[in-house]
Amino acid sequence: MSLRRIMIGAVLAIMALAGAAAPASAAVRSVAGALEIQEFQGDGIGLRPPAAVTMARADADAQAAAEGFTSTQCRKVSSTLFFDATIYVATVTISCSR
């Protein structure tokens, strides 16, 4: 094979890759324009209220992280706390957007 054929093949391969990538990047841009919002609810228990709430928030954060959200993309929306005989039970809801 001549060097010219190798160069032409390389240029065609690069053009083909660029052409194949264009529709995908265009699709990513259109999705990036839309805001994705998800809510996650975490549950926790503890002997004291702060421990229960911390555990519930950690549970919600872990669910969000599993879906690809970072902690800076999430905020606490609501929380509940009640005493159940010997332990505190907490629920924390977070809303994440990107």
Image (cartoon, helix red, strand yellow):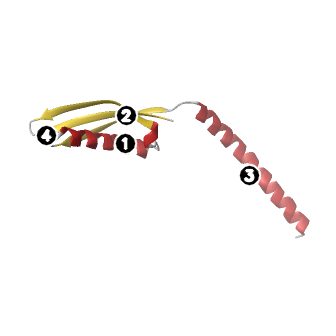
User: How far is disc 4 from disc 1 in space, using C-alphas?
Assistant: 22 Å
Q: Which residue is mark 3?
A: 17
Circle count: 4
Q: Quadrant of residue 31?
A: top right
Question: In front here: 4 or 65?
Answer: 65
Q: Is residue 84 above or below residue 65?
A: above
User: How far is disc 3 from disc 4 in space, using C-alphas?
Assistant: 59 Å
User: How far is disc 2 from disc 4 in space, using C-alphas?
Assistant: 23 Å
**Which residue type carries mark 4?**
Ile
Q: Which residue is mark 1?
A: 61
State which tag comes first along the sequence, 4 or 1. Answer: 1
Q: Is residue 42 left or right of residue 64?
A: left
User: How far is disc 1 from disc 3 in space, using C-alphas?
Assistant: 38 Å
Query: Which marked residue is nearer to the observer: mark 1 or mark 3?
Result: 1
State which tag comes first along the sequence, 1 or 3. Answer: 3
State which tag comes first along the sequence, 3 or 4. Answer: 3
Q: Quadrant of residue 77?
A: top left
Q: Quadrant of residue 41?
A: top left
Q: Which residue is mark 2?
A: 94
Label 3: few (<14), some (14–19) or many (≥20) C-alpha neighbours in 10 Å: few
- Residue 87, labelled with which disc? 4
For the residues bearing labels 2 and 1, Cβ distance under 8 angstroms: yes
User: How far is disc 2 from disc 3 in space, using C-alphas?
Assistant: 40 Å
